[in-house]
Amino acid sequence: MFNAITDVEGIKVGHASDYKAMTGCTVVLCERGAVGGVDVRGSAPGTRETDLLRPANLVQHVHGVLLAGGSAFGLNAAAGVMRYLEEKGIGFDTAYAKVPIVPAAVIYDLGIGDPKRRPDEAMGYRACVDASEGDVPQGTVGAGTGATIGKILGMKCADKGGVGTASISLGGITVGAIVVVNALGDVYDEGTIIAGARGERGFINTAEYLLKFGAVWDLKDISGELKGCNTTIGVVATDGALTKEQANKLASISHDGLAMAIKPVHTMSDGDTMFALSTGTKAPVSDKMFMSICAAAVEAVRRSVINAVKFA
């Protein structure tokens, strides 16, 4: 066990990083296909192929999920993931071609490094080449390369975010998560701030700041750094066989893990998005087991957020 999302059978993870531009991308591959779900809670999302994950729509399986920096520009990296999968003959079988299904979500990291260099098709492809079922590097790597948190008073007071992952065994079924933390809010571990906005005397406590000064604070100097410049994105996965409806519920409830570790979360300036994958290598789950899977997903997401900032 690697205490990573790759502990889920059928899941691979790869990173590609650009440390000069301070951006990158992370790919979660499920080459044998996985039932997918999604839940977008933030109000400033940057996403791709989320509609097809809804239960009523045709496509049942996805073949990878891309997490990337570069804001909306970074969605271009999904083309590299598609090219990699197509070369391997993987995709949704249509009459004339196999079309890889690759949903994606991005964070805004243009305020650190070079904003003109973003994840592209070549970087998405490199992340796939890097993908393995083994240990997953965490912190300042892949989509977390340029991630920052605690930007309520601008970048000058921000802390470093990153990528984190964790897994939980349920005695035969595994649940894992991987999260890219680029939040407006602070990160908490057991009620204590461990990363976030910093002032001269330590952490500012973003949630308390909003409650105390929200009606009178002056945003004229930092409003550009708040508008859509934050987002936490990630994937939860299990090898238990889920329906598409269950996968969407799993994506939805996984946001509780974000709320346990990030305060405030799901703000107007965050594009928080969580995907769910069921590789289905284990037997279909009972209602009671699904409840356990949901509880494990929440905890795996919480631990992943903490790992992201500890390794950053």
Image: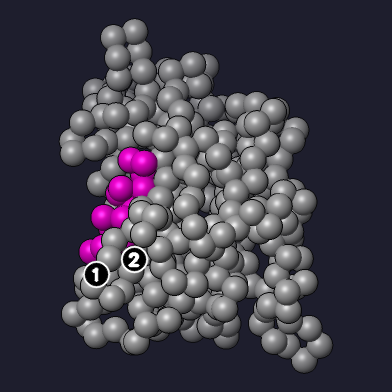
Residue lying furthest right: 96
* Image marks 1 and 2: residues in contact by CB distance under 8 Å: yes
Q: Label 2 crowding class (10 Å Cα cut-off): few <14, some 14-19, many 20+?
A: many
Give the vertical position of 39 relative to 164 (above or below). Answer: below
Give the vertical position of 259 relative to 247 (above or below). Answer: above
Residue 243 percent location from the top left of the image: 40, 83
Q: Quarter of the image holding residue 164? A: top left
Q: Residue at x 69, y 62 (%)?
A: 81
Residue lying furthest bottom: 95
Residue 282 percent location from the top left of the image: 37, 82
Q: Nearer the viewer, residue 140 or 231?
A: 140
Residue 170: mark in rendering: 1
Q: Main secondary structure of the magenta part?
A: helix
Question: Badge 2 is on which residue?
Answer: 175
Disc on the earlier residue, 1 or 2: 1
> In this view of the protein, can residue 283 be seen by the observer?
yes
Q: Quarter of the image holding residue 192? A: top left
Left or right for 288, reference 81: left
Tell me which amino acid carries mark 2. Answer: Val
Tell me which amino acid carries mark 1. Answer: Leu
Q: Nearer the viewer, residue 40 or 115?
A: 115
Q: What span is colored magenta in the figure?
A: 295-307
Residue 101 percent location from the top left of the image: 63, 72
- Residue 216 magenta: no
Q: Nearer the viewer, residue 133 or 275?
A: 133
Q: Residue at x 63, y 37 (%)?
A: 23
Q: Label 1 crowding class (10 Å Cα cut-off): few <14, some 14-19, many 20+?
A: few
Residue 311 percent location from the top left of the image: 42, 35
